[in-house]
């Protein structure tokens, strides 16, 4: 293998390139990136960068930059598997022996009419800069979506004393973590002055030239000078249409070794995938699952770099890495950390709680099986769950 192409310049693509060089690969290595920036960390976008305590340069991913040919400002348009060629949106063609699909995701677009100005999403550096610039001292901010991004942005803005209301159809914020944690998270936010409208949908985002308000399905009108749409994300995989690569709801299907599968379930020669655009068979999931965590992108990238240099039958599974999905979030003085595949839980149990700190430790179970844990301000406790939640290695 002498010519490897990486499609995607985020964490997964960059980490793959670093690991591939560390594995001894000395051939040509090209990274195609649709932005004009070198790879950067996304978690600070809704926190430190938005707050102004980080610069864009401080968001750069750590580690030595591998010897790479960069193709900035270009998107993948088509994959020709027969010719082993990646076609870019400007018509350029990049031949490959090995290919990593790491195109990630983009913010889900709002399905409805929007005013020309004042409505934002937050997924990249440009989004954060635009959102920050739109917020004046007397801004009234409505956040549509009470997931992690929505809640992190709410915490960041409330620390600056801004008026913030969060709307979501779910009955509690960050619903993937369960009702017990969601209810406590809501109380923390409310104690800092955030207003929630939960269990409510949005009928209309009002305004012509600029946003003026958000009309809820209850008939309530929320005055707004700025609106953030934080209703999830969609995979950047349209360019793979017609390639014969297996996808479910736009997510690329891999086996346990990060090898991409075709529509017949066979391994596609020389093609791997990693990060938020890829799904793999986690032992607590049903079939291949997409895990949109920083740690998962890192682990998949490391494994894909090792395996792309091996024949299919010699490749290592994710279980060998003892990879456990991990998430963290800083909101006010609370550090939230999780371990495990939280979506698998059908029951949550509070193990420990101190409302004064505040601290909290909750376990998630599927039946009698432990599948995840979440902690507020209990960093050491969550570490103990990593070993317990790692996949058993066969043989």
Image (spheres, helix red, strand yellow):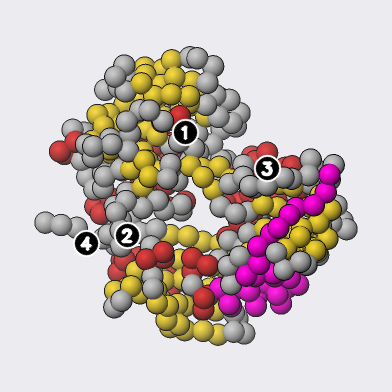
Q: Are marks 3 and 2 in contact (CB under 8 Å)?
A: no
Circle 2 residue = 285
Q: Give SS at disc 2.
A: loop
Q: Which mark's residue is nearer the viewer, 3 or 1?
A: 1
Q: Are marks 2 and 1 in contact (CB under 8 Å)?
A: no
Q: Residue at x 50, y 34 (%)?
A: 9
First of labels 4, 2 by sequence position: 2
Q: Which mark is residue 370?
A: none
Q: Give SS at disc 4.
A: loop
Q: Give SS at disc 1.
A: helix
Q: Which mark is residue 127?
A: 3
Label 3, label 1: how many angstroms apart (C-alpha)? 22 Å
Q: Mark 1 packing: few (<14 Cα in 10 Å), some, or many (20+)?
A: few
Q: Residue at x 33, y 43 (%)?
A: 253
- Compared with residue 96, is residue 307 higher up or lower down, i.e. above or below? below
Circle 1 residue = 238
First of labels 3, 2 by sequence position: 3
Taking depth in this image into account, of 206 and 190 the one nearest to the observer is 206
Label 3, label 2: how many angstroms apart (C-alpha)? 33 Å
- Left or right, residue 200 beside residue 89: right
């Amino acid at each position: 293998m002498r010519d490897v192409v990486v499609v995607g310049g985020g964490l997964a693509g960059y980490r793959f390139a670093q690991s591939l060089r560390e594995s001894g690969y000395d051939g040509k290595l090209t990274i195609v990136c649709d932005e004009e920036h070198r790879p950067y960390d996304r978690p600070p976008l809704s926190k430190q960068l938005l707050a102004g305590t980080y610069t864009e340069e401080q968001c750069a991913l750590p580690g030595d930059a591998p010897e790479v040919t960069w193709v900035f400002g270009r998107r993948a348009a088509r994959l020709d598997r027969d010719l082993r060629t990646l076609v870019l949106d400007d018509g350029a063609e990049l031949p490959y022996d090995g290919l990593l699909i790491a195109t990630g995701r983009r913010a889900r677009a709002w399905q409805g009419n929007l005013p020309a100005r004042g409505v934002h999403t937050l997924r990249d550096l440009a989004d954060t800069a635009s959102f920050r610039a739109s917020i004046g001292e007397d801004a009234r901010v409505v956040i549509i979506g009470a997931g992690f991004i929505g809640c992190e942005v709410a915490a960041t803005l409330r620390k600056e004393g801004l008026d913030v209301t969060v709307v979501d159809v779910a009955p509690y914020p960050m619903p993937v973590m369960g009702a017990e944690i969601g209810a406590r998270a809501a109380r923390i936010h409310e104690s800092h002055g955030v207003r929630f409208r939960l269990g409510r949908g949005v009928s209309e985002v009002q305004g012509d030239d600029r946003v003026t308000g958000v009309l809820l399905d209850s008939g309530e009108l929320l005055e707004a000078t700025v609106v953030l749409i934080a209703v999830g994300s969609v995979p950047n995989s349209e360019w793979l249409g017609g390639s014969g690569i297996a996808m479910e709801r736009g997510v690329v299907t891999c086996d346990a070794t990060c090898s991409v599968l075709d529509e017949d379930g066979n391994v596609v020669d020389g093609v791997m995938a990693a990060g938020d655009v890829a799904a793999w068979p986690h032992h607590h999931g049903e079939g291949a699952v997409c895990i949109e965590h920083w740690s998962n992108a890192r682990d998949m990238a490391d494994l894909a770099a090792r395996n792309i240099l091996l024949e299919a039958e010699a490749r290592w599974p994710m279980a060998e890495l003892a990879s456990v999905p991990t998430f963290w979030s800083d909101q006010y003085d609370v550090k939230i950390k999780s371990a495990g595949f939280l979506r698998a839980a059908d029951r949550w149990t509070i193990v420990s709680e101190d409302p004064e700190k505040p601290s909290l430790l909750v376990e998630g179970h599927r039946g009698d099986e432990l599948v995840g844990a979440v902690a507020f301000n209990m960093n050491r406790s969550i570490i103990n769950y990593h070993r317990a939640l790692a996949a058993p290695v066969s043989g």
